[in-house]
Image (cartoon, helix red, strand yellow):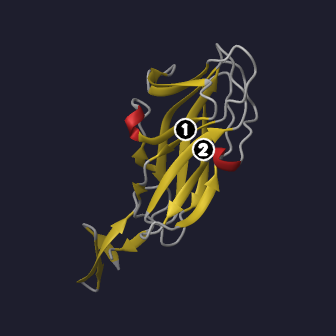
Amino acid sequence: MNVEKGILVWLGLALLPLRFCLAEGQVVWQGDFGAAHSWSETENYRDQLEFRFGDEDAAGAAALTIAGLATNRTDAAWRIRTKRIDWTLSGKYTFAVDLEASEPVWKVVDGGIWISSVKWFDRAGRQLARHRIPLQFPRQRQRASLTEVVPAGAASFEIQLGALAPYLMKGGWLRLSAISMSAQPLGLRTEQ
């Protein structure tokens, strides 16, 4: 058995059309921090933050800067969420994003609706799994990643990034850039 041009071939007979994931580590989806319309939701608990889509990170990539507006310490929980994105691959995936901050934030506190995660859905839109993304924002840009198994029956995913804390006062900021999802080992799924 082998795969030729997306068709499973066995004993010289074409059996089934297939979708197959790309080579290990191949980027399958790359998000865009260049504009807010790429995201289905941006939310800030008490409007104490400014979301600046289209900023640039140190490497010149489109970034989202979340900047503090308050002059005193106040609750400024935040989250952003992608629209649902189709996914037809099996095996493992890796979510990755570059993070940095005006001051080192070694632990991001999340909870409730403010959890950073990758959510997986079946064709009917039922949630299959939620993989939590641990975030830390260092002073210098660093890559954060999460590798998990794609749940059986997954047809789409959405990414939510957010936090209850740290509190960002005026002049403080968090920056996110280079967000992506990559396929890991080769996995095959028949078309339905």
Whole-percent x and y of residue 176? Answer: 54, 31
Dot 1 or dot 2: first in sequence order is 1
Q: Secondary structure at mark 2?
A: strand
Whole-percent x and y of residue 169? Answer: 69, 18
Give whichever of 47, 58 is nearer the camera: 47
Whole-percent x and y of residue 148? Answer: 60, 58
Q: Which mark is residue 145?
A: 2
Residue 145 appears in the figure: yes
Residues marked 1 and 2 touching at CB (< 8 Å): yes
In this rendering, the answer to whether 36 lies above or below 124 is above
Q: Secondary structure at mark 1?
A: strand
Q: Amino acid at mark 1?
A: Val
Q: Quadrant of the C terminus?
A: bottom left
In this rendering, the answer to whether 137 lies above or below 38 is above
Badge 1: few (under 14), some or many (20 or more) residues near its Cα, within 10 Å? some
Residue at (61% x, 59% y) in the render? 130
In this rendering, the answer to whether 64 lies above or below 71 is below
Q: Is residue 158 left or right of residue 19?
A: right
Q: Is residue 50 left or right of residue 18?
A: right
Give whichever of 20, 159 is nearer the camera: 159
Q: Quadrant of residue 40?
A: top left
Residue at (40% x, 72% y) in the render? 189
Q: Which mark is residue 146?
A: none
Q: Is residue 94 left or right of residue 21?
A: right
Whole-percent x and y of residue 173? Answer: 62, 21
What residue would you read off at disc 1?
A: 97
Residue at (47% x, 43% y) in the render? 180
Q: Quadrant of the N terminus?
A: bottom left
